[in-house]
Image (cartoon, grey):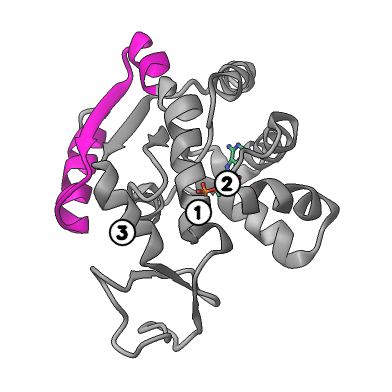
Amino acid sequence: MRIVMLGAPGAGKGTQAKKLIDEYGIPQISTGDILRQNIAQGTPLGKEAKGYMDKGELVPDKVVLGLVEDRLKQPDCQKGFILDGFPRNTAQAAALDEMLKGINMPLQLAISIDVPFEDLMKRLTGRRTCRSCGQMYNVYFSPSKTEGKCDKDGGELYQRDDDKEETIKKRLQVYESQTAPLIEYYSKKGIVRNIAGTGSISDIYGKVTAELAKLK
Ligand code: AMP
């Protein structure tokens, strides 16, 4: 199963992708997560990416494409993958098509999760993530039982640097101008499925898996 998750920051792509990993046993490739790991480890790539990320801008294509290419070569991607947060513009989408053509594994589906703008703001400003296991919470909609602590492993919950209000506005603008055109890009290939991203996580997940079931 080879899928791209499309949708604005805060649409719930990562949340849905993480549920799919558990059920289908295929990896999620989140370029945002890989970049944040590089920042945490202080790698040269992380240092280069951080300035762009803190401003809510896209990291240069050549940096991200290299990361994705390396990741797709790993054996766990043989069974398929869920791309989350990549591609972010049409140049990346075209480069991805080339990469996948080279390994004879074309994309099968682009799932576009649609959430109204006002909801995105609250989702992003309220978002908190566990430092140790990556579990996500939202202080408005799905808080942890104890404030600041993960329900699963007691890890510390933190707010991403780029989830601050000013950066969020920029990220949403970048989405509209650079990433939203990908819906049209994949529509032309006939592989887009639009899913309303409001409602409970499990309702949305039900709609996502219903689309995946049609693939088999
Ligand atoms: P995300 O976690 O997907 O919201 O990504 C957080 C930030 O990482 C974005 O605002 C960008 O600065 C950077 N980033 C993630 N994925 C990409 C990508 N495919 N291309 C360029 N920048 C990216």
**Identity, as a three-letter code, of the amino acid under mark 3:** Lys
The disc placed on residue 117 is none
Of circles 1 and 3, the one toward us is 1
N-term-proximal mark, 1 vs 3: 3
Residue displayed at 41% across by 33% down: 3
The disc placed on residue 56 is 2
Helix, strand or loop for disc 2: loop
Q: Quadrant of the C terminus?
A: top left
Residue pointed to by mark 3? 122
Q: Position of residue 110 (x, y in %)?
A: 36, 28
Within 10 angstroms of label 2, few (less than 14), some, or many (20 or more) residues? many
Q: Specify whether 171 is left or right of 47.
A: left
Q: Position of residue 100 (x, y in %)?
A: 58, 22
Q: Nearer the viewer, residue 149 or 16?
A: 149
Q: Are marks 1 and 3 in contact (CB under 8 Å)?
A: no
Relative height, residue 89 to residue 131 (above, below): above
Relative height, residue 184 to residue 126 (above, below): above
Residue 19 shows in this picture: no
N-term-proximal mark, 2 vs 3: 2
Helix, strand or loop for disc 3: helix
The disc placed on residue 166 is 1
